[in-house]
Amino acid sequence: NALTVEQRMRRKADIKFATSALVLLAVAAMLNLVIYRMPLGRIDTTQGKIYTVSKSAKNILQNLKTKVTLRYYVTPEEKMPAGMKDLQRNISDKLGEFAQISDKIKFEVVDPTANDEVSKSLEQKGITPFTLRTTEKDAVGIKNVYSSLAISYLDKPDDVIPQVMPSTLPTLEYEICSRIYRLTQPGQATVAVVAPYDAVDARRMQYMQMMGQQAPEK
């Protein structure tokens, strides 16, 4: 009898252990699914927070009433020079963040080299490959690559950023959002920045200089 009681107790313990293990596995599976579907974005550790969408950009995107399409025309990663292999992922991440902020933003990544007809039609929009010097395996070479972004809105002509490079990432958000703002205005829009000198950060100062605007005086 003592042996039978001990066997029963072990059996109950095994059943409880198996049940607990199944419950834990189910909970872990659910958490994994939730985390996988959650738009966490990327952790921005850059000095200028170039991967963080600014408040002004969010305002422009969230106020969109009609769909805006962003098409990134880029040479495939394996054909890119070493210094530009991460460019497609970085740009796609940025455009993906825009799409998360506003359901009016749609973005596509297009390989212009996959179809001759596509590359020919892009020439009419001013989208052409450009030449880069490369240094790989101690050999200097030249590559023609695509890395351009076109912004489409209604029946208006596309607004094109002809060259998107790693060096232009710090100002890419401004370049895209200022074009979206201009395209979506019913008339000719004028963008002005009015703020005390101390309130204008270094990145905005650079934006203003690029646009030919005068920064506030001290």
Image: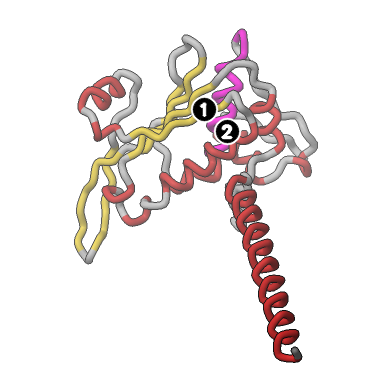
Dot 1, how many residues are within 10 Å of its Cα: few (below 14), some (14-19), or many (20+)? some
Which part of the image, by quadrant, shows the C terminus? top right
* Residue placed most toward the observer, 143 or 202: 143
Residue 176 in percent (x, y) is at 54, 31
Q: Position of residue 153 (x, y in %)?
A: 51, 16
Q: Is residue 51 above or below residue 98?
A: below
Q: Are marks 2 and 1 in contact (CB under 8 Å)?
A: yes
Quadrant position of residue 11: bottom right
Q: Residue at x 49, y 24 (%)?
A: 69
Q: Which residues are magenta?
A: 172-187
Q: Which residue corresponds to mark 1?
A: 106
Q: Nearer the viewer, residue 174 or 51?
A: 51
Give the vertical position of 213 relative to 89 (above or below): above
The image quarter in which residue 138 lies = bottom left
Q: In the displayed structure, does residue 95 sit left or right of residue 32?
A: left
Residue 68 position in % (x across, y down): 54, 21
Magenta region, main secondary structure: helix
For the point 28% across and 35% down, which residue is it? 129
Q: Is residue 203 above or below residue 59?
A: below
Q: Is residue 153 visible?
A: yes
Is residue 217 found inside the magenta-colored segment of the image? no
**Tag 1 secondary structure:** strand
* Screen quadrant of the N terminus: bottom right
Local secondary structure at mark 2? helix
Identity of the residue drawn at 68% across and 73% down: 17
The residue where tag 2 is placed is 99
**In percent of the image, x 37 and y 55: which residue is there?**
83
Judge left or right: residue 18 versus residue 121: right
Q: Residues within 10 Å of mark 2 (few under 14, many from 20)?
A: some
Residue 189's x, y, as percent?
Answer: 62, 15
